[in-house]
Amino acid sequence: MRSRNIAWIIWHDKLLSRFSTILPDSADTRQVLRLGDSVRFNDYTNDISQVYEQAQLLILPSRAEGLPLTLVEAQAHGLPIIASDVRYGARDIVNDGKDGFLVENGNVNQLAERIMALLADPAELMKFSEQAYQDSWKYSEEAVWKKWLPLVEDAKKVAEIPESVGAI
């Protein structure tokens, strides 16, 4: 517990100067977290695409995760991802060192270092962003359908469904 607190103190000021949007605004939240004016809080939005378009990175420091759609959405908007390397999820989507970074689960220092490094190097950030966008194609409707089509065709043959009934 002590090392997490030390890491937070070390990176607190640097990270807060880089973050711009996280939660709806609340005077209590600002006071408890001692944020002052370092962070801007936004209300709920139905236009998540706009949020992705305004972001530079997607940070997902989860202790446990499934396969979050958030990662795929972020890549589709060209966002590099910095995520905890938990057993499932991020490592299935993020190409470490190419379109984002996977950090050791619970390693706050490594998380902060990766965030700061990408934000401090616009050329590297752009390279990661372009790669993230390219990598998102494998989750596109077209790419997924190409993988499903042979399975559907095989299932129709096995079930002996007439073409007119099995048309998709």
Image: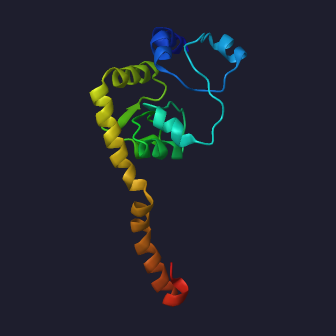
**Direction from residue 108 to residue 113 in the image, left or right:** left
Q: Nearer the viewer, residue 17 or 65?
A: 17
Query: Residue 74: horizontal and vertical position, in percent?
Result: 46, 41
Above or below, 126 relative to 36: below
Colour scheme employed for the rendering of this structure:
rainbow
Q: Nearer the viewer, residue 84 or 99?
A: 99
Seen at 37% across and 23% down, the residue is: 119
Q: Is residue 83 visible?
A: yes
Q: Nearer the viewer, residue 5 or 161?
A: 161
Q: Nearer the viewer, residue 119 or 107?
A: 119
Query: Residue 155: horizontal and vertical position, in percent?
Result: 48, 79
**Direction from residue 2 to residue 30 in the image, left or right:** right
Q: Is residue 88 visible?
A: no
Above or below, 29 relative to 80: above
* The N terminus sits in image quarter: top right
Query: Residue 117: horizontal and vertical position, in percent?
Result: 34, 21
Above or below, 4 relative to 75: above
Seen at 52% across and 42% down, the residue is: 49
Based on the displayed image, in which of its 4 quarters is residue 114 positioned? top left
Above or below, 3 relative to 57: above
Q: How many marks?
A: 0
Based on the displayed image, in which of its 4 quarters is residue 39 positioned? top right
Seen at 47% across and 14% down, the residue is: 17
Residue furthest right as drawn? 28
